[in-house]
Amino acid sequence: MPRDTRLLQRIYRNLPARGFKPATLLAIGGAVMIYGWWQYGKGAREQREYAREKMWSRIHLIPALQAEEDRDQVRRYLADQARERELLGGENFKVYNNDRFVKPTFAVTPERTAKK
């Protein structure tokens, strides 16, 4: 019986190791991680470029949006002056004691009406 045990031990010890060596596994894992971080860096750089482009497009749109808001304010102001002239009989009263334009803090809107 002891001889059979020695024979089995000798056979099992001469079998090759299964799988990759630890150094190979480490190299493959490192290569995968380097590739992943490289792709992440490319994506982050692209997202920064998109954010920069979005910011500059908004900066260039500000004058057009401001002009549109100014036209709307002038239209509302003139309509308010006409409504005031109609209600008060021809003369508008100055609310402020100077000639400087003061942007209205609220807009006059019609009251809600229930549909019958």
Image (spheres, rainbow, N blue to C red):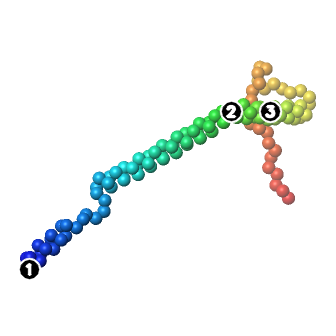
Crowding at mark 1 (Cα within 10 Å: few <14, some 14-19, many 20+): few
As drawn, the label of residue 60 is: 2
Q: Say which residue label 1 marks.
A: 1
User: Image point 32% across, 52% down: which residue?
Assistant: 26
Q: Say which residue label 3 marks.
A: 71
Nearer to the camera, 69 or 5: 5
Q: In this view, does 37 lie to the left or right of 72?
A: left
Q: What residue type is labelled 3?
A: Arg
Where residue 50 appears, x then y in whole percent? 59, 41
Q: Which amino acid does label 2 sit on?
A: His
User: Image point 66% across, 36% down: which residue?
Assistant: 57
The quarter of the rendered structure image containing the C terminus is: bottom right
User: Image point 24% across, 65% down: which residue?
Assistant: 16
As drawn, the label of residue 14 is: none
CA separation, marks 1 and 3?
106 Å
Does 82 sit above or below residue 13? Answer: above
Nearer to the camera, 91 or 104: 104
Of the two numbered discs 2 and 1 in the rendering, the one whose residue sits closer to the viewer:
1
* Tag 1 secondary structure: loop
Q: Which amino acid does label 1 sit on?
A: Met
Residue with the most extreme top position: 98
